[in-house]
Image (spheres, coloured by chain):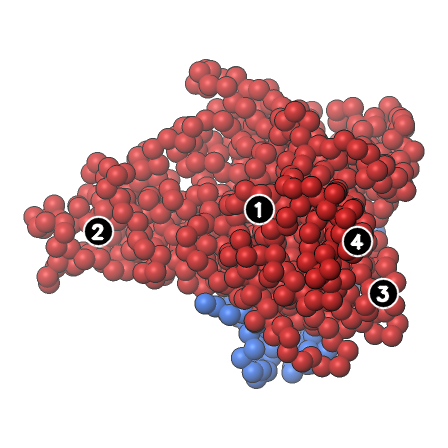
Chain colours: A blue, B red
Amino acid sequence: MAKLNINGKVRDVQAEPDTPLLWVIREIVGLTGTKYGCGVAQCGACSVHINGELQRSCSIPLSSVKAADKIVTIEGLSANSSHPVQKAWAAVDVPQCGYCQSGQIMAAAALLKKKPKPTDADIDEAMTNICRCGTYQRIREAVHQAAGNTRAADRATRRS
Amino acid sequence: MKKMIFGNGQRLSRRAFVVNSATAAGGFALGLNVPFVDALAHHGKASEHNATEVNLWVAIEPDDTCIIRIARSEMGQGTLTGLAQLVAEELECDWKKVETEGISPSRNLAAKRAWGEMGTGGSRGIRVSQDYVRRGGAAARMMLLQAAADQWKVPVGELSVADGIITHGNKKISYGKIAAAAAKLTPPDPKNIKLKDPKSWKIAGKPLKRLDTADKLNGSKVYAIDVKLPGMLNAAIRDAPVFGSKAVSFDDSKAAKMPGVRKVIKVKDTAVAVVADTWWHAKTALEAVDIKWDEGENAKVSNATIKERLREGLAATENNGERRNGDALGAIAGAAKKIEATYSTPFLSHACMEMMNATVKLSAGKAECWVPTQNLESSLAALSEASGIPLAQCEVHRHDLGGGFGRRGGTQDYVHQAVAIAKEFPDTPVKLIWSREEDQTHDFYRPISVCKMSAGLDDKGELVGLHVRSSGQSINAWLNPAGIQNGKDRRQLQGWYEEPGDAQLGYTVPNLLIEYVMRNTHVPVGPWRGVNTNQNAVYMECFIEECARAAGKDSLEFRRSLMKNHPKHLAVLNAAAEKGDWGKPLPAGVHRGIAQFMGYGSYSAATAEVSVDAKGKLKVHRMVLALNCGHPVNPGQIAAQAEGSVAYGLTATLYGEMLIDKGRVTNTNFDSYEIMRLAEMPKVETVIVPTYDFWGGVGEPTICVVAPAVLNAIHAATGKPVRELPLKNVKLV
Ligand code: FES
Ligand code: FES
């Protein structure tokens, strides 16, 4: 039995110590917003925050998470999708299929916490999650928007 | 996959249900071969809340919420929003009050397929349904107006309507108040339905926000992989690594004792699955099962042997599909200048972010399935066939997909597997999830091909003869043998056709010979976003570039000179060139490329700006994509699809290839099957140049011009053509 603090709630979870945190979150705690995409720390679909740090939960064994660690999943990022990143994601219409977007949003939120005014280079470096639908251009735009960065209206879309 | 004939279930006995793995046209599932009946008819009660069903496509709640029915699958491409816009436009309702409801395949079947085909592939979602969904919206509007006219005892022609409010003089009534009366009326004669001129559209044609975003932002969206059901078990599967081989035996003595394990099962002849309480337990235990495979001759196959076979096809003389005019070989032989080049493109996996999965529950006389699918009817058919339970007692629950790209159409292999597993656990839902490794190694891959191109130029540098000979694997041979007629598989010539409308070659060449020769392998193949257009566009557009350079002509001008008979292709090429600043100066070290092609009834062109540094490192800075899809329904979503096609197409260009060794795929996850990240995404500008005289697709057309535009820009940068993909294997300098 391990104790986990997820989204501000302490829960007892029963799982083998080597179970990846991703699968504890999805199958034992039952929060399915955190996604499985590769299982090998490549895609970022499983991204969560642990003590404010971005982590790929598929590659963190349960045994390495302490009861005092504060885990935040996409479900706990904000009430009513009110985090600036979520609002910007809606305003820019970022998601296509949406499957990768929990991870993208968690990554963007972590970036803005560290760098409230990220440059394009900061975004390139921080936003390394895979999106197969190819929403990268809108992710970049939405991160800038969430940061309140003023960019020339170079929205790369001509809407005729 | 073989063709399956259904005839079970009394209510279905009068018809034969032909379930095909793929259509000749789009490469996706046909579903059930039942005629599409009167789409305007009523069909029972609306399923939701207090909504009154006005007709099949529209139900209205007392608070004026308009529920628009959607039959096609949503996998990120935005078809749900686009289809709703088309209905809402004709309905004249308030867009802010629109909600959508997905139709289940059982409901469609019970209504004699009143909602039409559900297959979602071949970029058909909107172009094939637009007429009947718009008619559905228009018919509902006519009935609502008529009901108001009846109530007020005035001629219907004196009423006006906007945003779901009907007005006559001082009188006003909202759709929600009149829907019940409208639903009792006889639907209008289809002959009297007049659709709006697209020029007057107010909802359709506008870059409206998607309707399906909210639950993608907070983790609440339930994909099929997220389904939770009481008492549910979980399964992990390992199918034979060498395609076509068998599982002979397995030793589960270790796995059976591992935590949570319920059963280790052989699935058909080829796979072993572990069923456990959680998927993590199932997957961990599966790794401990010792499986003996009978790998056979296929275990000798590798990329090298496949390439050899394809090259042999180039040298052979027969063909399995051709197009010809004049005497290409003679014209090339007698030409002032001859050019020759051989190109190749590899197998590719789809790598949908949500891997293949299906949850199945089998009970006495009932089968249920929760699955991400591009063809709900094919899933239903697969569920029935695999379970032996009549179609009418099967139910497939709709879930939006975490990506599709052509992988989840007719084949339904994962549904067959999930049913085989669930048979061992009656009355218990079992969720089968493929690991990423399973997903990478058991795809229906984009086929491999090689193509030899030869051309002759006269002394003025004009193209007098062109010979194209492509040798590669056939999707039809794997999925839809009926699509091959008299040994000819014309689908492989996609984008090179003479006839207009779908995928016509935009060039006129006085002496032309295009040949396809079939060289199949044991690797399963299927449609992959853009299907054959991707490869055929690379071959044609990179070679036309080589010809232009050999002729000493500008790439754009050389193309234009071949396109006089193809004004639509030309207009899109010109739009890309203009927006892409063709001919204008670029920063030092940056070079431009251009390409055009046609597929899925739409015309595409692109320019790319790239630089290649002294070490051969490539950077794609900017791309402009131009598209004429006839009627743009949501320009914002069209741009999103164009942007997405750049990411999907560039990933393939830069990194995509399946490594086949000893008969199996050896690059099994994203560490070895690399996917492009945000940092490599160029700035993409989308230009839509609609002509409003046809309806073309959107999801697939633009991808095919991505690779050739970039490759032609690299050619401009380095002075050397690239003839082999992916680029990670090519030394650029
Ligand atoms: S699932 Fe964790 S990084 Fe891909
Ligand atoms: S939105 Fe589909 S994978 Fe990113």
Disc 4 marks a residue whose amino acid type is Lys
Q: Chain of mark 4?
A: B
Q: Can you give x and y, in whole percent of width and height, for residue B170 in the image?
A: 10, 63
Q: Is the residue at mark 4 from the same chain as the one at mark 1?
A: yes
Q: Tags 2 and 3 in contact by the CB under 8 Å rule?
A: no
Q: Secondary structure at mark 2?
A: helix
In this rendering, which labeled residue sits more in front, label 2 or label 3? 3
Residue carrying label 1:
B503
Q: Is residue B70 left or right of residue B242?
A: left
- Residue sticking out furthest to the left: B153
Q: Chain of mark 3?
A: B
Q: What residue sits 61% from the left and 56% below the top?
A: B562
Q: Can you give x and y, in whole percent of width and height, for residue B566 in the image?
A: 53, 54
Q: Tags 4 and 2 in contact by the CB under 8 Å rule?
A: no
Displayed quadrant of residue B246: top right
Residue carrying label 4:
B338
Disc 3 marks a residue whose amino acid type is Leu
CA–CA distance between discs 4 and 1?
28 Å
Q: Chain of mark 1?
A: B
The answer to whether any part of residue B567 appears in the image is yes
Displayed quadrant of residue B381: top right
